[in-house]
Each structure stands twice: as structure tokens, then as C-alpha cells.
Image (cartoon, grey):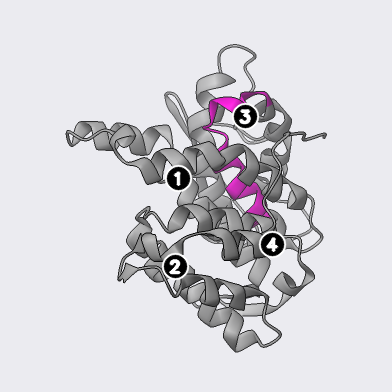
Amino acid sequence: MTITVDDVLPDPWGLLAGTDWASLEHARGSAAGTPALLAGLLADEAGTQARALRHLNDPVHHQNTIYSATVPAAAYVASILRDPRTGTVVVDRDGRALPLRAALLDWVMSVAIEIDSEAEAHMAGAGFSLEEYPESVQVRALRPGLFQAVSAFLHAPDLAVQEAAIAAAVSLLDAPELVQQRALLTPLVRDVLVCSDNRSTASSPAVVSSPGEKTQVPCLTSKTRICGRAAAAANRPFDRDLHGEEGDHLSPAGVMP
């Protein structure tokens, strides 16, 4: 599978130094202190990295809200994913011990689903327009670059990183610029959602829905959490664009509806 997106990611240190963070806001007000905390993601001490991760989750992306500070924070996170220091094991907001890189990919996914077409439809139903929120429009513009960053880990040897990367990549495919990537990712998503016969299965299956049907897909114990999220995120773009035209949707091979 070949993924190519011609968006150049920013230099992380230049981004931290060149952004007027004091003019930006997060859930607690001014984001003036955010660059120093974000720099901690690449610290040599796991506790500092965990603190920086907590800052990303709250206040930069508090309760899944997109703030003005979320925009450069997302670009920064994407630009450091390849740094070996993101391999440090930390505890995320759900209490899971996992590589920092996986937690950052989870964070990218969380940001992406807040500005996709489904989120836009929910806003419209409440009488709001996503286009009225500049920070959301700006995150949408970042999606090709974010995809470029996360797609580097679609075949990561670490299972937690690979699954987080797939979930993040699929969540970004709502972007019109990434339509051509959807068919390339379909087989990979299927592979992650379907259990191999020589691994134990989880008691709680992920549910993959396509128009008019629901398919119970048992996931490996270690995969359950992110598989379910990947499946839920994937159905929106994959079913809309692939099902019907080529009959290529997310019902895994060998699993009957």
C-alpha cells in the first residue's frame, strides 16, 4: 500500500517559537504557557511527558472542544510523531499504559472527529455552522498534513501504535483532499478488525455498520478499544464512497451479516 500526500509538516521547534500563543486560547484562557508544556512531550523524563499529554487533553482539547490553541498544537503533535522520544510508555487519560506515540495518535483522532462531516451535521441540527468557527476551519485545512504524519505508522510493529494510527487515519479521511486514500486503507482496516484464529478473542465485539445491516466483529483482547473506535470512524467515509460503487465496504471477509 502506498500513501502519498504532498503536505510538508512544520518544524516543531520553529512552530513553538514562531506561534503567538499568548493570542490563542484554550479551556482555561490564554495559551501563553502552552508551548513550554508541549515541549515537554519530548522531555527525557516520563513524568514530564505525561504532564504535557494531560495538558493536550485538558485544557487544549477540553471535552473534545476545538480551541484556537488546538490548531497549532495539532500541527506540533503531527510533526513530532517520528521522534523516538515518543516511544516512551506513559499513562493516558483512560488509565492505559501505552507508548506516548499511540496516545498522541489517539489525540489526533479525537481532534479529527470534531470537525468531520458528522460533527458538522450535528452543529447544523443545533442551528450552528462549523464554518462560523475559524479554529475548526483551520483544523480541517490541516488534515492532509496530519494524515501524512499518522500514515507513517499504519504498519508500526507496536500493535497499540498501529491501531491508533489506523483509527486516526480513518478519522481524517472525511477530508475531500484524501478521497483517493480511502480505497487504499480499506483492506488494512479489515485486517485490524478481523481476528486471527490463533489469538484469543475479546468478550465485547466491535460493531461495524453499513447501510441496512450491523455486523458483529470480534476483536482481539488487546485490540478491542481502538478497533471499535476505528470501525465507528471508518463507516462514515468508507460506506458513503465505496459501498455501492464497487461493493467494497467494511464487512470483513468471512464474517456474515
How many other residues sit within 10 Å of disc 3, few (<14), some (14-19) or many (≥20)?
some
Q: Nearer the viewer, mark 4 or mark 3?
A: 4
**Identity of the amino acid at label 3?**
Leu
Look at mark 1 in the image and give the residue it sits on: 113
Amino acid type, label 4: Ile
Asked where in the image residue 11 lies, by quadrant, the reply is bottom right
Which of pointers 1 and 2 lies earlier in the amino acid sequence? 2
- Res. 256 image quadrant: top right
Residue under the image location 67 percent in, 23 percent down: 180
Is residue 80 shown in magenta? no
Which residue does the numbered mark 2 point to in the structure image? 57
Write the start and end of the magenta stretch as one range: 163-180
**Residue at 69 percent of width and 49 percent of height:** 149
Number of residues whose C-alpha sits closer than 10 Å to that of mark 4, classed few (under 14), some (14–19) or many (20 or more): many
Asked if one can make out residue 93 in the rendered structure from this viewpoint, the answer is no
Sequence-wise, which precedes: disc 4 or disc 1?
A: 4
Q: Looking at the image, is 56 positioned above or below residue 107?
A: below
Could you tell which of marks 4 and 3 lies nearer the N-terminus? 4
Task: Point out which mark residue 178 bears.
Answer: 3
How far across and down, in percent of the image, does residue 255 sit? 63, 36
Q: Position of residue 141 (x, y in %)?
A: 52, 37
Q: Does residue 120 show up?
A: yes
Earlier in the chain: of badge 3 and badge 1, it is 1
Farthest residue, direction left: 127
Label 2 is placed on what type of residue? Answer: Asn
